[in-house]
Image (cartoon, rainbow, N blue to C red):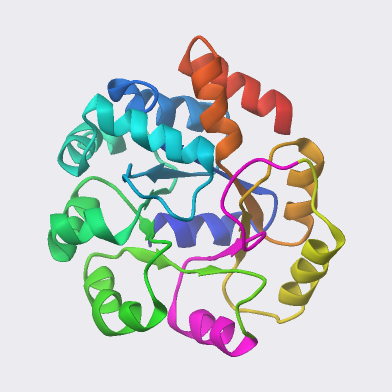
Amino acid sequence: MNRINSLFQEKKENILSVFFTAGHPRLEDTVDVIKELEAKGIDMIEIGIPFSDPMADGKVIQDSSTIALKNGMNLKTLFGQLKDIRKEVSIPLLMMGYLNPIMQFGLENFCKECQENGIDGMVIPDLPFKDYMESFKEVAEKYDLKIIMLITPETSEERIRQIDNNTDGFIYMVSSAATTGAKDSFDEDTLAYFHRIKKMGLKNPLMIGFGISNRDMLKSAQQNAAGAIVGSKFVKLLESEPSVSSAVEKLTDVLI
């Protein structure tokens, strides 16, 4: 069974997933970040593929992409770093990135490399649902990869149900229509959106992401979904702390 499915079968609530940008702040940090996060009890990890125009991301993640690209990170290098990851890490790993680098690498080649290097799924923010159904779904399923689709407060109920009926793994519930970036709290409209989606009774688990930066926000997200995804907060800590281990330690101190 795919590790993503196994996780949500075994743990129904309070799941915590963490995003980081591969190659940031140092090119060689990728494996250390993954190992340190798992050692601290993180349930799932999203490995960001740096891209020059990450339109869904706020300044923190945009800047991390710029640094990673300057460091020389690309998909070939990233897959090389991950080739032995499953000898040491057992939690689900996803790639998160934009269409352009994936299509330049070649979709089938990308999916094949993901499978060979222990990747369980992918999040592609700019992948239209129509293209997913027509071109991506079959290839991803061939390599047992879960393509995770995003929904926002503006996504119609019809589209949400289409996504729920045609995907497997979890649904990435974006907390706002804005770009990524840490915030202090969820407003009333966001909480109403959480409650509305929760009441839909979808078959796929929900994970809430974008902007989660403190214990109260994490608790609120976890109360309204299977779990939460933290990104910008951790990316900032990787820059400000003296080591990967101290950044992970600080993250868990802040959130858990």
Residue 82: quarter of image: top left
State the image coordinates of residue 56 (x, y, percent, origin top left): 48, 55
Is any part of residue 53 visible from this angle?
yes
Above or below 154: residue 12: above
The residue shown at (47%, 69%) is: 149
The residue shown at (23%, 53%) is: 101
Is any part of residue 87 visible from this angle?
no
Determine the residue located farthest toward the right in the rendered image: 188
State the image coordinates of residue 71 (x, y, percent, origin top left): 26, 25
Residue 139: quarter of image: bottom left
Determine the residue located farthest toward the bottom in the rendered image: 158
Above or below 115: residue 126: below
The residue shown at (35%, 34%) is: 66
Question: Quadrant location of the C terminus?
Answer: top right
Q: Is residue 132 left or right of residue 10?
A: left
* Residue 181, magenta (yes or no): yes
Q: Is residue 63 left or right of residue 175?
A: left
From the viewer's side, name the closer residue of 2 and 180: 180
Residue 156: quarter of image: bottom right
The residue shown at (27%, 85%) is: 134
Question: Quadrant location of the N terminus?
Answer: bottom left
Above or below 66: residue 108: below
Provide the residue span drawn in magenta: 157-183
From the viewer's side, name the closer residue of 7 and 135: 135
